Image (cartoon, rainbow, N blue to C red):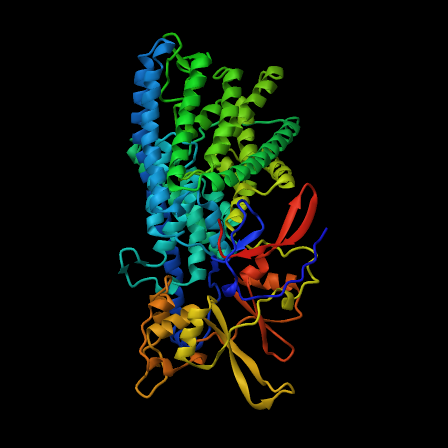
Amino acid sequence: MYQSMDFKGYDLSNESEEIVPIGSLNHLSTKYESLDYEVIENELYREEEQKKGYRYVVQKDFSRWMTFFWIGVTTAFIGIIIFISIEIGTTFKFNMIKKYFDGCTEADCVYKPYLVALLLNLIPSLVGSCLIVYIEPMAKGSGIPAVKCFLNGIKVPRLIRLKTLVVKVIGVTCVALGGMWGGKEGPMIHAGSIVAAGVSQGKSITFNKDLGALNFFREDHEKRDFVSGGAAAGIAAAFGAPVGGLLFSLEEGASFWNQALTWRTFFGSMVSMFTLHSVLSAYHGHPGDLTYKGLLNFGEFDDLSYHILDIPVFVLMGIVGGLTGALFCHLNLKLFIFRKRYVNKDWKKILEVLIVCATTVTISFLLILFTSDCKKLGLDPTDHPIQFGCNDGEFNAMASLWFQLLEGTVRSLFHDTPDVFNTTTVVYFCICAYFITLWTYGVHFSGGVLIPGLCTGAAWGRLVGRAVFHFFPNTNIGIYSLIGAASQLGGITRMTISLTIILVEATGSITFGLPLMICLMTAKWVGDFFSESIYDTQIELSGMPLLAWDPPPLSSNIYANNLMTHPVITFKTKETVGNIVKILKTYSHNGFPVIEYVQNYELDEGKTKCYLRGLILRSQLIVLLENKVFDGPLTNYWDSVTMETFREDYPRYSSIDDIELLQNDLKLTIDLSRFMNPSPYIVQHTMSLPRVFKLFRAMGLRHIVVVNDSNEVAGIVTRKDLARYKVIRHMGKICVTELQFSSKMD
């Protein structure tokens, strides 16, 4: 079904502030602006292009490759810092817990290791949460949804700043040390994106340092490509999967792609992986071993063979993963609404983190206390086997699942020996893991859902493997644990191709690609039937105007004059400084059509006819006012203003309120024809929404000027005008609804 929509544009700057209902998915926030991907081919640009030669082309291309190299190296060292910090901290913590556990032989003394574990987990969790709440909230979570929006063309405030990176690194380390169910692999994607954005600009605004290099990359479309490569480098460092990183950036992140970017991204991912491997191999006493695993090591499977009769079982596991993943997304949405209503103070946010941390520790100790699963030493899949409740020469299998990093728990569940864990142990662990992951995801800490999702799926996948093993004793249980892990994470995130390759690279077996793809596609189809992915749900809740790949179906009856914003604020080719300042202070628009009136041409209505001459951006006007590029008897700006003048302030342009002008300056004029974009993209007012959408999406535009039959400016189409048409798919039904604008998102 299709809901027909008739919408008349309006001035968003004059829209009254509306409080969005908590948990609403039907609002777009007006606080998010778009990035300027379009190249402005004005006179300054043409003059600069004429001075360039083929040497410049070669130099710029070489600089791109070198920049991707340093992005890979820097991202790898970020991962190394995280890895070593976590390894040192967790080794100390687990040894302390083991010491108190091994000294406890009766149930009545379990409070000693419990209090030690509680204290050692609460302290880093408190530090990490305080950093997020009070220092940089943008470092919360994995950062994948925000990076995805940035690559789609949305300007996300504070997303790629140095302070965000520092808080992210410290925060994700605290999460691991605090025993919280949050993986460091998702945050590595965000960290790689920040590194790419910083390295590619050749300057640091935080430290007020400009190296004077890479000036030609100080444009939004150039930064976008580097951030895509940085996200891929983060995946490569986290999983040791350079091809998986490339495909993740292509499938989940980037909205714009080209062949050259593919090669450079793959190069940066390879550099990131091998840099991390070489350093960590030397750190662990194996210098020169470039095959050393990355931050995540699934171990090696002795046998990954499968039979055609296994395929139906894999499909059923994909269905289970899709159903449980859809339920996870639905319940997490309800939990988000609850948090917005009741966990709305800073101290409450920190308190929730501490409660989640304490609950996780308590559950782990209760399971260890009330289950009896003792195995002989030698089968232990952990570096810190705990004897509690077992005889000499044995270890507690339940404790081995809880008292190690989540990555180690996943590796333990992939163990192909059927006798490592009792069925009861895995059942209890699986149920607790699912709900702890559900509760933890969304609290104020730096951690993703990738590894917790894999861990939960590996648990119930192992149960399936044990059931199959009961009938077919030659079955490798680890295979089913791997399929369960993939199905669960696929049902939550709806990743397909990239997750397949990541797991193939992590397990080192290309022959297992088909079963992984089958279960992941099944999980995605089943999950999409009921809900959006966890990342898309977060984006919708934030009100970000994300543009989908395709226009809404059956929308050809909506035309440009129905979706455009009008009336439009315009400038003349020669405009007074006072009028420019007044308009910039009155309106929040970022693009203004430049028009020229036809002399001595009067219409029947008595109005002078005007033609479109170009488009000028707010950032350009700010730079012109800041440098006082005015027409006057004592001004001569033609030789002093170049493209470098506009790049110097990129990306943080001044506010119009910060510019100081004399009273006499307001009477002067600015010739905008030299600085405006003389050839902006324009469409006729009769063009259909699908054609406007495809043009806007394919070219990465921020503004499209709409003209009437006489080539007069009729309106302007922005990202928000297109993003408000949302396609809803649920339970086999499809419809298109119109979202509402709001300047305040609760």
> In the image, what residue occupies the spot 46% across and 64% down?
36
Q: How many marks?
A: 0
**In front of the other: 427 or 137:** 137
Residue 604's spot in the image, x, y percent? 65, 87
**In front of the other: 99 or 721:** 721
- Dividing the picture into quadrants, the one containing residue 314 is top right
In this picture, is 273 found above or below 368? Answer: below
Q: Does the rendering let one see residue 360?
A: yes
> In the image, what residue occupies the spot 29% across and 34% down?
283
For this orientation, the residue located farthest to the right is 1
**In front of the other: 657 or 365:** 657
> In the image, what residue occupies the spot 31% across and 16% down?
100
Residue 164's spot in the image, x, y percent? 36, 48
Q: Does the rendering let one see residue 381?
A: no
Residue 530's spot in the image, x, y percent? 64, 39
- Dividing the picture into quadrants, the one containing residue 629 is bottom left
